[in-house]
Image: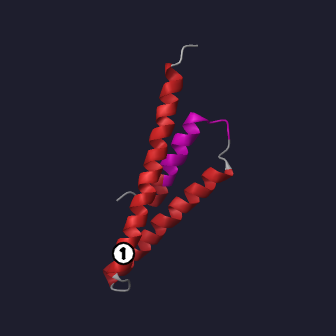
Amino acid sequence: MISQISAANAYHSALSSVAPTEPLPDGAKSAISDFSRVMDEMDRTAQGAMTGQADTHDLVQSIARAELALDTVTAIRDKVVEAYQELMRMPV
């Protein structure tokens, strides 16, 4: 399983490589923070389920939220890469 920190770092690196001179907008910082929070919650719930401290139903819900967050981040990354490639194909 990919850790939330490495996923957020990879996303930030990809975003920085596209526009390295511009700081991240507040919305992007918030999105990265929300993604990290969802992944942390999923990790805590998974650990709780393994130790018997969390309900299986909570684990399934947490995994579903994490999967949705990861799918969203992946879709955003794909769109950023697609836009970058389109810009690179433009004649100068």
Find disc 1 in the rendering and name its residue.
59
Left or right of 10 in this view: 28: right
Please tell me in which quadrant of the rendered image residue 44 appears. Answer: bottom left
Q: Residue at x 47, y 35 (%)?
A: 81
Name the main secondary structure of what is drawn in magenta: helix
Q: Position of residue 42 (x, y in %)?
A: 42, 69
Span of residues in magenta: 8-22
The residue located at (67%, 52%) in the rendering is 26
- Pointer 1: residues within 10 angstroms few (<14), some, or many (20+)? many
| Left or right of 80 in this view: 29 | right
Expressed as whole percent of the image width and height from the top left, the position of residue 3 reads 42, 59
Q: Position of residue 61 (x, y in %)?
A: 39, 72
Vertical position of residue 91 compared to residue 12: above or below: above
Question: Could you say whether the residue bearing mark 1 is in a helix, strand or loop?
Answer: helix
Magenta segment includes 9: yes
For badge 1, the amino acid type reads Leu
Q: Is residue 25 magenta?
A: no
Residue under the point 54% across and 25% down:
87
